[in-house]
Amino acid sequence: MNDLRSRPKGRYVLEADWQELYILTENLKADLLFYKDDLRFLQHLIDKYFLWMSKKENIDKVRDVEVNLMETSAQCISLLKRTSIHLIHLANLIDDAFKYDSHKLREEHESLEDDIANFVKAFRANRKDILAITEYVIDNEKFVEQIMNKKK
């Protein structure tokens, strides 16, 4: 599971035609848009449960996770911009094969895929952390609430 790139194995980027790379890049962009929405959901989750927290230790944990989430969100937006630019380059190359250096464009594609794969790894780690801290906070807050209700 170390290789999170979308393309087939081997020398695909070096041998694929421009239309195939364009379709692959559109799929990468669709994936990034999904991750962007998921990041928005995770931010909403943090915002919602941040209000429930009464313990300083919980607030500190969430703050660390939120900083990582903000960095991952910025990375996602940057990758979406790069992907859009790459799609323009591919479309221009499809229209006029001599407009861009094809070797350079294939290197650009590989770099983009590698950066997206690294983003996905960071995203998954952040998502895991956010869900874990949310679960921890909810469980602890419910436990405190139950104890308080028993004392009444």
Image: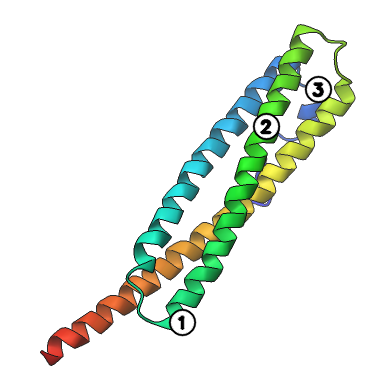
Callout 1: helix, strand or loop? Answer: helix
Q: Quadrant of residue 83?
A: top right
CB atoms at circles 2 and 3 under 8 Å apart? Answer: no
For label 1, the residue is 57
Amino acid type, mark 1:
Glu
* N-term-proximal mark, 2 vs 3: 3
Amino acid type, mark 3:
Glu
Place of residue 40 in the rendered image (x, y in percent of width and height, measured from the top left): 46, 48
Callout 3: helix, strand or loop? Answer: helix
In three-dimensional space, the C-alpha distance between marks 2 and 1, rounded to whole angstroms, equals: 39 Å
Q: Residue furthest left?
A: 152
Answer left or right for 121 relative to 102.
left
Q: Quadrant of the C terminus?
A: bottom left
* N-term-proximal mark, 2 vs 1: 1
For label 2, the residue is 83
Amino acid type, mark 2:
Thr
Q: How is the image coloured?
A: rainbow
Place of residue 38 in the rendered image (x, y in percent of width and height, measured from the top left): 46, 46
For label 3, the residue is 15
CB atoms at circles 2 and 1 under 8 Å apart? Answer: no
Label disc, if present, on residue 31 of the rendered structure: none
In three-dimensional space, the C-alpha distance between marks 2 and 3, rounded to whole angstroms, equals: 20 Å
Q: Is residue 109 above or below residue 48?
A: above
In three-dimensional space, the C-alpha distance between marks 1 and 3, rounded to whole angstroms, equals: 53 Å
Query: Badge 3: how crowded within 10 Å, few (<14), some, or many (20+)?
Result: few
Q: From this viewpoint, is residue 77 visible?
A: yes
Answer left or right for 109 relative to 30.
right
Q: Residue at x 53, y 36 (%)?
A: 33
Q: Residue at x 20, y 82 (%)?
A: 146
Callout 2: helix, strand or loop? Answer: helix
